[in-house]
Structures are given as C-alpha cells and as structure tokens.
Image (tube, grey):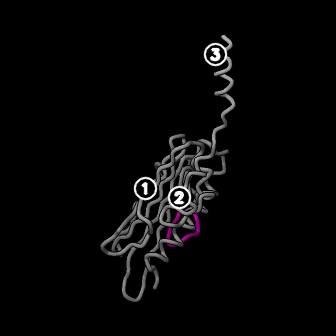
Amino acid sequence: MAMATAVALTGCSSEAKPAARNLPERTCFGVFERSDLAPLLGTGEKVTVSGPPDAQLSPIRRGGTCTVAVDGPGRFLATVTRQPLGRGFFWNREFIHPAPDPVPLGDEAMVYNTGARAFVTCKGRDDQFELEVAVSGSVEQMKYGEGRPLFIKLITKLLDSAKQQSKCGE
C-alpha cells in the first residue's frame, strides 16, 4: 500500500511542460517564432514539424503546408497557395460557427475561432497571380476569446511573409 501511494505521488509531482520549448526558434516557412505558436501547442514532449523551409511560391511551386504536431493536445497548420489570376478561392463561410469576422487584410480575409484565412491579388511587372494563406490550430487549452486575436496576429505575419517571399506586387 505504501509503495502504491509513493508511485501515485511521484506521478502527480511531474509537471507538464510546454511543447513549444521543443520547437526551433523559427518555424513554418521561417515565419513564426516559438512564442507565436506556444498558446496553440499546449503540453507535450514530442513536437514534429513538417513542411517546406520557405513560402516562396512560383508558377511551378504553387503551394506549401506546414504542420506542427504534438504528442499532447496541441497542433498547428499553416498553408500558402498560389494560383493563376482570376481563378479565385472559395470559402464555405456558412459552415463556420460561430460566424467568422472580417479582417482588413488584402482583398479578403476572415478570422474564426480555430483559424484565419486571407486572400490577395498579386499584380507585379512580370507576373500576376492570386495568393491565399491560412492558419488553424488547437484552441482547447486556451481561454475563450483568446483564439481570434492570436489567429489575426498569425495570419498577418504569414500573409506579409508569403507576399514578400513570392514577390507579390514586385
């Protein structure tokens, strides 16, 4: 009986550690800092990051996805997509509950409880295309109402970086 109690107490004393501490300082296309993603990742020991090192899109490389997975409850996903001018992007807003809020970024952008999207038309001297960026993540470990402001911050960083790396407007 004494042995079982000691084991139980030992188990309780080990405190869960933030999963973000296992991330590189910059991740997901080189855009996000460890501290940017920490609220979405919760706790865990093993963090896996997959995706291209940058968001430099071209007519040949038309998209990229970065995923951050944790052995605990957290996850994060970021995508960048380029397509020919005039093709457009379709978002099923009517299926997002509660309803998304508009965000003043580019041609169109929105934020919702578990992510955000933005779309811009890129018209440069030599190239014209459409660019979409999206972020989503786990919000279960966050306080209600903290998700949308964080997703606005993340989508703004991703859009700015994707525009620069893909030479949008040059």
Instruction: Report the predominant secondary structure element of the magenta stretch.
Output: loop
**Which amino acid, mark 1?**
Ser
Q: Which residues are magenta?
A: 103-110
Return the residue at label 3: 4
Query: What secondary structure is marked by label 1?
Result: strand
Q: Are marks 3 and 2 in contact (CB under 8 Å)?
A: no
Return the residue at label 2: 116
Binning the other alpha carbons within 10 Å of mark 3 as few (below 14), some (14 to 19) or many (20 upward) gives few
Separation of residues labelled 1 and 3 (CA atoms): 41 Å
Q: Are marks 2 and 1 in contact (CB under 8 Å)?
A: no
Query: What secondary structure is marked by label 3?
Result: helix
Disc nearest the viewer among 1 and 3: 3
Binning the other alpha carbons within 10 Å of mark 1 as few (below 14), some (14 to 19) or many (20 upward) gives some
Binning the other alpha carbons within 10 Å of mark 2 as few (below 14), some (14 to 19) or many (20 upward) gives many
Q: Position of residue 93 (x, y in %)?
A: 47, 54
**Quadrant of the image containing the N terminus:** top right
Return the residue at label 1: 50
**Which amino acid, mark 3?**
Ala
Q: Earlier in the sequence, mark 3 or mark 2?
A: 3
Q: Residue furthest bottom?
A: 125
Q: Residue furthest left?
A: 60
User: Is 81 or 48 nearer to us in this picture?
Assistant: 48
| Image point (43%, 54%), residue name | 92
Magenta segment: does it hold 108? Answer: yes
